Image: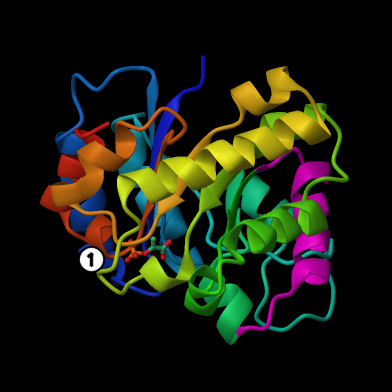
Amino acid sequence: MRKKIVAGNWKMNLNKEASLALVNGISDGLPGLSDMVRVIVAPPFVNIPYIQDASNRNARVEVAAQNMHFAESGAYTGEVAADMLQAIGINTVILGHSERREYFKEDAHLLTKKVEQALEHKMEVIFCFGEKLEDRQGGNHFDIVREQLSDSLFHLNDVDWDNIILAYEPVWAIGTGETASPEQAQEMHAFIRNLIEQHYDDEVADRVSILYGGSVKPANAKEIFSKPDVDGGLIGGASLKTEDFLAIINSI
Ligand code: PEP
């Protein structure tokens, strides 16, 4: 059975002190959480070791990276390699976030290389994708999502999918306060699971976790998470506040 996942993407927020307060608050709020729920936080690289130390107190909070480079090592100033993350115990990485696609011009070709590099290292990938507002308004959202998945993931083999978590994040809902309705989220998640079934089989489709991301907050989390193909959420803004993040986790 698929585990539920609530992941917090802290983006470029919180210094050492503030992020320690946040992770400690989250850890303190988790006793009693079902083993079927995973809680992941993704701090900026520089804060990862501090957050790991703090989260080790309560093994329920896992730590992920927000990004990594596709190369093993080399002359890529400012970048971080898979091997470096693994050496400090990071085995999960977010790839394909819409902010990376938009501001850092990460395209399908680059993302495919990053996914392959992560999988080569047996890292787990939280792969983000989703349509822009104009795609949704033009009725092209299913085509865009199909293309994003097939460009970067559909060449993978069945076993690779053990290390893939999908995060459907409609760009128009990220950080905007605008949320896909629970029905829109379910419709797209079912479409995605069906695509995977067509490309692979029902066993692969059934075991992949598909998270929803885009302005999830305590007020809407329960309804979104109640949908059968929504296996949890990737949370931005609301993951920066202890009470909100805990409330979202408790909505699963
Ligand atoms: C995100 O950036 O992945 C995200 C979902 O952000 P927010 O929850 O703030 O919309």
The quarter of the picture where the C terminus appears is top left
Q: What is the quadrant of residue 73 in the picture? A: bottom right
Residue 87: give x, y in percent of width and height: 66, 47
Read off the residue under disc 1: 17
Q: Quadrant of ligand 1?
A: bottom left
Q: Is residue 206 above or below residue 191?
A: above
Mark 1, other Cα within 10 Å: few <14 / some 14–19 / many ≥20: few
Secondary structure under tag 1 reads helix
Magenta-highlighted residues: 104-124
Q: Is residue 117 magenta?
A: yes
Q: Which residue is pictured at 28% across the width and 71% down the height?
A: 14
From the viewer's perspective, is residue 80 above or below residue 26?
below
Is residue 246 among what the camera can see?
yes
Picture residue at 45% right of the left edge, 54% below the top: 49
Q: Residue 31 occupies which quadrant of the picture? A: top left
On the image, the x and y values in percent for residue 5 come to 41, 35
Q: Which residue is found at the position 15% from the left and 35% from the top?
A: 29
Three-letter amino acid code at the position of disc 1: Glu
